[in-house]
Amino acid sequence: MTDAPYKEGSTAAPTRHALDWRNPSFYDIAATEAEMERIFDICHGCRRCFNLCDAFPRLFEMIDASESGELEGVPKSRYAEVEEACTLCDMCYMTKCPYVPPHPFNLDFPHVMLRYRAARAAAGHTNFTARQLGEMDRNGRLASLIAPLANWASAQDNKLTRPILENMGVDRDSDLPKFTGRTFVSEAKSNAPKADASAPGAARKVALFPTCFVNYNNPGVGMAALAVLAKNGIAPKILYPGCCGMPFLEQAELTRVARQAEKVSRAFRPLIDDGYTVVTLTASCGLMLKSEWPLLLPDNKDVKALAKAVMDIDQFIVDIARNEGLAPGLAPIAGGVTVHLACHARAQNVGPKAAEMLKLIPDTQVEVVERCAGHGGTFGVLKPTHEIAMKVGKNAMRAALRAGTKHLVSDCPLAGRHLVHGMQKMAEAGQAAPAVAEHPIEILAKAYGVPRG
C-alpha cells in the first residue's frame, strides 16, 4: 500500500490509496506478509470485525490457539487460510474499521488480502476452476449457443454431471446461475419499450451498462429496467463493451482488470462527454466502475470520467424521484418485499437505495436485511468454501425468513440466489421461502404493471 502523510487526530472522511500494483515489490510475498503481520496485529487488538465474515474468526482463533496467545505465535504459512476466507466485500473497511486512512494506522484489510492473493498468484498459487468460472464473457457467449444443454448440465439435481463438476472443484450443493439463449442486448434491440416523452424524466440522457450477468444470465432484469425507464420518459442507449472485471479482481488478475477498465471506460467516454449518465444493473459492477477502477488506474482520464458519471439503477430512480418526480401508475405489491442490501451496494457509500426506491411504491411492506449473504462470487460455488459461504449467510437467511414477505430482492444476483437456496433449506413449519430472488427494479416494474420477464 502507498504510504501517505497523516495528521494525528484527523477527522477527515475515510479515503483509500491507489494500489501500487505495477510496482514489482507489490508481488513480494515477504514484504506482503510483513504488512499483513502489521495489520493482523492491529485487528487482534481490536476484534471489532469478529462477526463480519470467516476471515476474522479464522485469524483470531489461530492467535488464541497459539502458544503465546499473540500473533507472533502464528506461522506466516497459515496467513493463506485468512486470505482464502476474504471475499473482498469491503464491509470491514466501509462499516467497521476505525483505523482506515487517514488514521495513522493506515489499515486496509481487503486490499492487503488482494495484494497477498496477487503475490501468491505470481508465485504460481492459483485456482484453475475459479479462473475459468471468472471468464464471464467467454462462458456467456459459448453457453448462450447451447443454453438448454448448459443449464441441464449445471442443474443441481443432475446426478450425472454434478459429480463431474464437483471433481473439478464446484460444490454439488451450490446453486449455479442459468444461461439464456438470447442475450439482453439482442432482446433489447427488438423489444425495447417506447419511452413516454411526456414523463417527468424525459430530459435525462442515459447510457445503460447491462453487466455480464444481465446480458447472459438474466435479461429479464434489463427488460424490467427498460420498462421502468420508459415509463419515466427515458430510452437509454445500451452499451456492453465487456465485463467489469470483478471476477478477475477476485482472482487478483489485476492486469486483466485494468484492461477491462480501459476498454469499457473508453467506449463510454463519448457519451459521458455528451452529458449521459451511465447506469449499471448490478451492484458489484457499480462498485468496480465507481471505486475499484480508479484505484487501479488513478491517472486514466476515461476511468475518472466514468467514475463520476455512473449510478446504480436504484440510485438513479431515487434521483429522478427526488428531482423530477416519478411517473404515476405505481400500484401496491401484494405480500411485501424483503430487500437484501448487498455488500457491494453498501460499499458504494450512497445509502440503501434499493430500499429507498421500493418504499416509493404505495401501501407496500418493505423489510430490510443488512447482513452479508456469504456468497462472494466463486467463493460460494467452490467446494472448499461453499459450506463457509452458507454459514456466513445464515444470519441473513434467517432474517429474510423472519420477515415473511412474498418477495426477496438483492442488487447482487448471486447473493440473491444464494439466500433463496439457503432459505429453502432452512424454512420450518409456517415459514415460506420465495421461489426465486428478484432484482429491485423488477419489483418496481411489477408495480408499474410490467410482468416478470
Image (tube, helix red, strand yellow):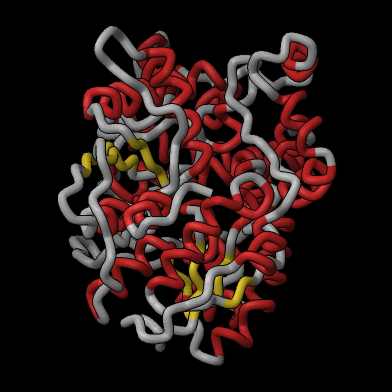
Q: Is residue 11 above or below residue 170?
A: below
Front residue of 355/236: it is: 236
**x 64%, y 24%: residue:** 382
Count all numbered tags in the image, as a single digit: 0
Q: Residue at x 57, y 37 (%)?
A: 377
Residue that lies at the very extreme toward the left in this rendered image: 363
| In the foreground, 280 or 13 | 280
Q: Is residue 316 visible?
A: yes
Judge left or right: residue 116 versus residue 363.
right
Residue 393 versus residue 369 in the image, above or below: above
From the viewer's perspective, is residue 120 above or below residue 204? above
In the image, taking residue 144 as reference, residue 42 lies left or right, namely left
The residue lying at 65 percent from left, 14 percent from top is 157
In the picture shown, does residue 315 fall above or below 419?
A: below
Residue 381 on image: x %, y %: 61, 26
Q: Quadrant of residue 285?
A: bottom right
Quarter of the image holding residue 13?
bottom left
Residue 90 rendering spot, x and y as whole percentages: 42, 46
Residue at position x 41%, y 32% in the image? 373
Q: Is residue 22 visible?
A: no
Residue 450 placement, left or right of 209: left
> Residue 278: x, y in percent?
51, 74
Horizontal and vertical percent position of residue 352: 28, 54
